[in-house]
Image (tube, rainbow, N blue to C red):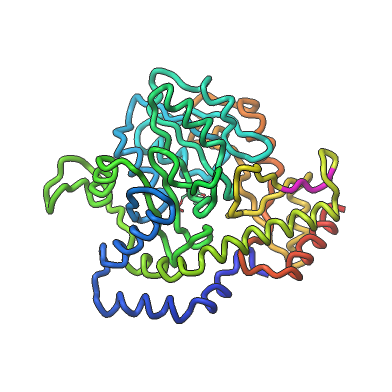
């Protein structure tokens, strides 16, 4: 069994993907070709955002957003310590200081009730993460940001396609940043990402920063990156967009099926040996990961592996405990919910083509492993 099966999807989409790629090979516009523009228009409409800027990765998307907002040395950006490293890494790489707020134990996302206490006169932005495929309480975060006149950058790398109160992830904040890394809900065949905004000036700046900060050919008012989305990756994404809604329906069905199987096998509540993820009633979750909590995770993972079921840990160490962030002055106990989650979480195989029989096999293996 694959942890994420990309081959079944390719077999389904082969004619569309192959012909889209062949078209690029024929016209030869590998850099910012027509597919990039077509994809940007399609994605902007999908997210409900005025602008979409295709970029080279989710990581570049975060950095470009920070650079466009002129965030750098002396500034602070509030984020969470329980996320993929890139979130805080790009804040630090931009020269600013990541300031952490603990997560909600139920959803693993920013606890909006703790946000205000982390804001200081140096705060320049708030960067919540939509972890595992569902959004945090965006309205609550936006309301606080609005009071302090701070932009919100949603790290939507795991939540493309998810909705919050009927609105799409990526389109509800000053900037939304997503990733098309192959294993994300919408993935390309290499690295890719996108930025979303309704702000014309910000969109223009992000487009400039994407190409070395140039406002016209070989004229540079600012520094930027080599941060473009490849035309071939845009072509792959265009083919995949045709089935994306269908795949989201499948992801939600797989998530519900796991929840049912886990409840049947382990029960619910605090004493259950396996804790299934909770989705807020105002959210739809696209399950970039289907992540449960268990005791003695290492033993459980080893046993499941021996039963032919791969697992993964997203993420084993909260970012305030990473060696590179030691200087920030946090210690064990600073963010108890993040630390507990980091100790207990374990992701199960998850993709839209997972069959009922495979899910039964995963949950059976889980039951043997925790016994
Ligand atoms: C994957 C991911 C990123 C980085 O995206 P890349 O495309 O791999 O650079 C950033 N933040 C989160 C939360 C992610 O899951």
Camera-side residue of 311 and 238:
238
**Residue found farthest to the top:** 121
Task: Residue 171 in the image: state x and y as whole percent.
Answer: 43, 45
Q: Main secondary structure of the magenta part?
A: loop
Q: Quadrant of residue 26?
A: bottom left
- Where's the N terminus, which quadrant? bottom right
Q: State whether residue 199 appears in this view.
A: yes
The structure residue drawn at horizontal position 61% and vertical position 65%, both measured from the top left corner, is 352
Q: Is residue 275 magenta?
A: yes
In this rendering, is residue 307 above or below 301?
A: below
Task: Residue 244 in the image: state x and y as whole percent.
Answer: 51, 64
Camera-side residue of 76 and 279:
279
Q: State whether residue 306 appears in this view.
A: no
In this rendering, is residue 143 above or below 22?
A: above
The structure residue drawn at horizontal position 82% and vertical position 41%, both measured from the top left corner, is 269
Residue bounds of the magenta highlight: 272-276
The structure residue drawn at horizontal position 42% and vertical position 47%, both measured from the top left corner, is 177
Q: Is residue 2 magenta?
A: no
In this rendering, is residue 237 above or below 152?
A: below
The structure residue drawn at horizontal position 65% and vertical position 26%, both measured from the top left corner, is 333
Q: Is residue 128 left or right of residue 220?
A: right
Camera-side residue of 227 and 243:
243
Q: Is residue 142 left or right of residue 196?
A: right
Task: Residue 180 in the image: state x and y as whole percent.
Answer: 45, 58
Camera-side residue of 128 and 280:
280
Q: How many numbered discs?
A: 0
Task: Residue 250 in the image: state x and y as whole percent.
Answer: 62, 64
């Amino acid at each position: 069994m694959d942890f994420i099966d990309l081959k079944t999807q390719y077999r389904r989409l082969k004619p569309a993907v192959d012909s889209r790629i062949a078209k690029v090979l024929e016209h030869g516009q590998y850099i910012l070709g027509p597919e990039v523009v077509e994809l940007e228009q399609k994605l902007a409409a999908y997210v409900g955002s005025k602008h979409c800027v295709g970029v080279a990765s989710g990581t570049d998307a975060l950095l470009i957003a920070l650079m466009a907002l002129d965030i750098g040395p002396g500034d602070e950006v509030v984020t969470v310590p329980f996320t993929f490293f890139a979130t805080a890494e790009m804040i630090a790489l931009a020269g600013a200081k990541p300031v952490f707020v603990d997560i909600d134990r139920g959803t693993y996302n920013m606890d909006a009730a703790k946000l205000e206490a982390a804001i200081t006169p140096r705060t320049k932005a708030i960067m919540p993460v939509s972890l595992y495929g569902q959004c945090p309480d965006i309205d609550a975060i936006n309301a606080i940001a609005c009071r302090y006149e701070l932009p919100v950058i949603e790290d939507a790398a795991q939540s493309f396609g998810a909705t919050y109160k009927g609105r799409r992830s990526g389109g509800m904040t000053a900037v939304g940043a997503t990733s098309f890394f192959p294993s994300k809900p919408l993935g390309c065949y290499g690295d890719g990402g996108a930025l979303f905004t309704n702000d014309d000036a910000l969109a223009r700046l992000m487009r400039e920063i994407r190409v070395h900060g140039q406002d016209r050919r070989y004229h540079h008012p600012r520094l930027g990156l080599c941060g473009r989305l490849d035309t071939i990756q845009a072509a792959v994404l265009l083919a995949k967009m045709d089935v994306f809604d269908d795949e989201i329906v499948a992801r939600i069905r797989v998530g519900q099926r796991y929840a049912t199987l886990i409840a049947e096998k382990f029960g619910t509540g605090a004493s259950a040996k396996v804790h299934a993820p909770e989705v807020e009633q105002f959210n739809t979750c696209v399950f970039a990961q289907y992540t449960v909590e268990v005791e003695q995770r290492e033993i459980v993972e080893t046993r499941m592996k021996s039963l032919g079921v791969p697992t993964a840990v997203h993420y084993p160490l909260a970012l305030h405990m990473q060696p590179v962030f030691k200087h920030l002055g946090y210690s064990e106990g600073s963010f108890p919910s993040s630390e507990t989650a980091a100790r207990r979480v374990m992701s199960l195989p998850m993709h839209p083509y997972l069959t009922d029989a495979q899910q039964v096999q995963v949950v059976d293996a889980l039951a043997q492993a925790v016994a």
